[in-house]
Image (spheres, grey):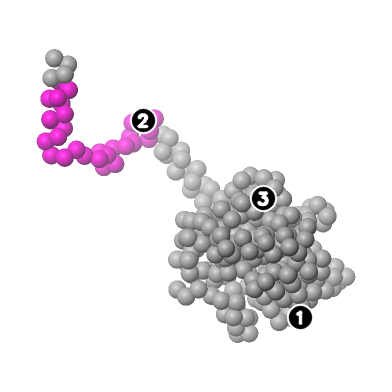
């Protein structure tokens, strides 16, 4: 499978072909995602909640993001991989933004980086783009700013709020972003932004009209159970499958049913008898 480029994503938008995007945080998951034919992988700062058990994304560090992104790139060498800029890796200055975006490219081999915010991060977007890197914007519900938004709540659900998001979207586009992620907005708002921008507009909880969709892998597989956002469709319930497997393993070990002969190594022919004679002679 040939890896998508940003040009491919633009052409998909023009043809009306939907982009498929999912998060991944480790080598084996990334490999399975690539084998399935996914267009893009986001190594999201959602790793903080679904892997590390943090209450939110804010504690996630650059080193953690690089670590997970390296693993994903090794697992999916032919998939478009996006590294997610964690909290305070770009907000403080344009220089910080450029240096940390550069780490994703130099250390993890990403195809693009993603950062949150609208008009307020225009200087950072311009700086990163002018340095030769690809930026994907992120507006709507931006988890790193969830405290300012009153928690993990839908955005753009009034006419004024939708128009404000549109202004942010246009600012991100004009700053040089190659694509935009819109999160947790009504379908009308998602459609307005999609129709108003030249660049691909991808949604997570932004309705069916966006140029593509993003899902958190742990939500899609039914592994993460702490909470389930309204926009999540579970395509599997692997948490139940995993619990059953763990319980079956525990039971078989307790009952002496595992490991059986089928799961044991064998000594070379005649060596078991030789070992027994050697042990017997020592005892004598």
Q: Position of residue 208 (x, y in %)?
A: 67, 72
Q: Find the magenta span and give its range.
A: 252-280
Residue 188 appears in the rendering = no
Front: mark 3 or 1: 3
Q: Quadrant of the N terminus?
A: bottom left
Q: Disc 2 to disc 3, how far (Cα)?
A: 42 Å
Q: Which residue is mark 1?
A: 196
Label located before the other in sequence (2 or 3): 3
How many other residues sit within 10 Å of disc 3, few (<14), some (14-19) or many (≥20)?
Answer: many
Q: Which residue is mark 2?
A: 255
Q: Which residue is mark 3?
A: 60
Whether label 2 touches label 3, CB < 8 Å: no
Front: mark 2 or 3: 3
Q: Quadrant of residue 15?
A: bottom right
Work out whether 178 lies above or below 239: below
Label 2 secondary element: loop
| Frontmost residue, 152 versus 57 | 57
Is residue 278 within the magenta segment? yes
Label located before the other in sequence (2 or 1): 1
| Frontmost residue, 174 versus 63 | 63
How many other residues sit within 10 Å of disc 1, few (<14), some (14-19) or many (≥20)?
Answer: few
Label 3 secondary element: loop
Front: mark 2 or 1: 1
Q: Position of residue 131 (x, y in %)?
A: 67, 71
| Frontmost residue, 166 versus 209 | 166
Q: Quadrant of the C terminus?
A: top left
């Amino acid at each position: 499978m040939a890896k998508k480029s940003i040009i491919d994503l633009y052409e998909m938008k023009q043809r009306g072909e939907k982009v498929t995007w999912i998060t991944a945080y480790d080598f084996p998951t990334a490999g399975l995602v690539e084998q399935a034919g996914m267009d893009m992988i986001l190594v999201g700062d959602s790793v903080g909640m679904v892997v590390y058990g943090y209450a939110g994304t804010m504690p996630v560090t650059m080193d953690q993001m690089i670590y997970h992104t390296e693993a994903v790139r090794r697992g999916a060498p032919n998939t478009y991989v996006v590294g997610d800029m964690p909290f305070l890796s770009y907000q403080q200055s344009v220089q910080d933004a450029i240096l940390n975006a550069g780490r994703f490219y130099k250390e993890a081999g990403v195809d693009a980086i993603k950062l949150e915010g609208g008009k307020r991060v225009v200087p950072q977007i311009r700086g990163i783009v002018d340095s030769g890197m690809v930026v994907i914007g992120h507006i709507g519900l931006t988890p790193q700013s969830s405290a300012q938004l009153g928690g993990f709540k839908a955005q753009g659900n009034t006419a004024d709020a939708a128009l404000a998001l549109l202004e942010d979207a246009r600012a991100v586009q004009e700053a040089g972003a190659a694509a935009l992620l819109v999160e947790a907005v009504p379908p009308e708002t998602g459609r307005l932004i999609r129709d108003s921008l030249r660049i691909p507009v991808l949604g997570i909880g932004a309705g069916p009209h966006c140029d593509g969709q993003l899902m958190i892998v742990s939500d899609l597989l039914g592994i993460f159970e702490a909470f389930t956002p309204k926009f999540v469709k579970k395509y599997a319930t692997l948490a139940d499958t995993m619990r059953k497997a763990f319980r079956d393993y525990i039971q078989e070990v307790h009952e002496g049913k595992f490991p059986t002969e089928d799961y044991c190594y064998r000594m070379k022919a005649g060596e078991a008898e030789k070992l027994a004679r050697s042990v017997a002679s020592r005892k004598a």
